[in-house]
Amino acid sequence: MDQSREEKFGQPANDIEKQWLLDRLKTLSVREKYQMSAVMLTTGQLKEVSGQEGDELLAAVLKMDRKKVQEAINCLLSLSDYEVLCPVGSYEALGEYYLRYEAELPEAAIPYADLEQIGRRYEDQHPGIFMGDCFVVLPGREPRQVYDGTNLDKLWETDWSLRLRLASPAVPKGAWICLPDHAVVEQDGRLGETALALREMKAESISECELLEVRCSLPGIAILPEEYADLEDLLRDGNDLGFLLEEQGQGMPDFLDKFTGALEYEGCHRLPEALDIAQNLHCYDFMRADEVGAFGKRELEKRGGFRNPLLRDCMDTVGFGEALLEQRGYRLNTAETAYIRRNDREFQPLRTKPKQGWDMTL
């Protein structure tokens, strides 16, 4: 009886899941709201929380069982799979978008094109849904199932860097922007995160806006509004961090572990310092915790330890490796997944004044 009830109604979601879901729903950017609406209209998911705010949103999340909460978390983690083209509110506008920015035909050819027909053909190849003056392209594959019900504390999203809530005189409650804003570097005619938010707030530029709230995807990084007198500087740093996270240090092995390890090593809690550290990861030596045993074995071999029959199979290679790393100045990170130390390479800060220890020659 109890088992069939659980199968029918699902198990209660835990507090961590509910809090994660609530935080994300409260910080959706204007662009993400279009994406979420497309998810709801095409899959029926997230309909329990769509359009809800404040106490109504809290009540809706609290009512959801664990299966629904997990589905909602995975939906939100896959929002970036939904491409938003804007302003593209009709087949004719969609056809014009394609001609201008994808087909790259000369401007003079546009008046002679059947834009509506081209737009319909574009939709055939890129199924999507019109929402106001936007066209949301649906993903060509099943949404990612990143969250398996157990790994929420291990999920670190690298597809965003900062979430900022900006307000304008016309919209004092504000709107959220999720960085990086790819429209900053990709001039393809569509409105990006910042432009969509400005339109929502009826503002012409960032200079008309006030920063109400900001969140960073990097653990431990706090951004105080007074640190950035110019919002453009905050947007620039947020975009730089976002592109850096996407590129994973241009393919550097173990980039995230090295980056977060260096932040912890330096006690870094500020965004400009974090960006400087990211550009100077060559100044840190790094070893994964699961490699320490092999390291200890290699060091014993150098000392002839395994050639002595009395010592064979009697040495704790992990413990020996850990002791050597400690002697050489390595520190174990809080997660106990890696060891890190500063080496003797010169640290070159670009955004901040040199911090004590950064320019050391060891």
Image (cartoon, helix red, strand yellow):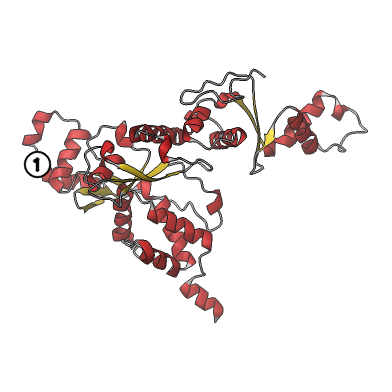
What is the number of callouts on the image? 1
How crowded pointer 1 is (Cα within 10 Å; few <14, some 14-19, many 20+) is rated as few
Left or right of 260 in this view: 102: left
Please tell me which residue lies in front, 171 or 43. 171
Left or right of 330 in this view: 94: left
Whole-percent x and y of residue 127?
26, 50
- The quarter of the picture where residue 244 lies is top left
Please tell me which residue lies in front, 76 or 267. 267
Residue ranking furthest to the left: 112
Quadrant in the picture for the C terminus:
top right
**SS of the residue at dot 1?**
loop
Residue ranking furthest to the right: 310
Please tell me which residue lies in front, 274 or 78. 274
Whole-percent x and y of residue 356?
60, 25
Q: Is residue 20 above or below residue 242?
A: below
Whole-percent x and y of residue 134?
22, 48
Q: Amino acid at mark 1?
A: Asp
Residue at coordinates 28% horizontally, 50% vertically from top-left? 172
Q: Which residue is labeled 1 in the image?
A: 114
Residue 117 visible in image = no
Q: Is residue 16 above or below residue 93?
A: below
- The quarter of the picture where residue 291 lies is top right
Q: Is residue 208 above or below residue 20?
A: above
Quadrant in the picture for the N terminus:
bottom right
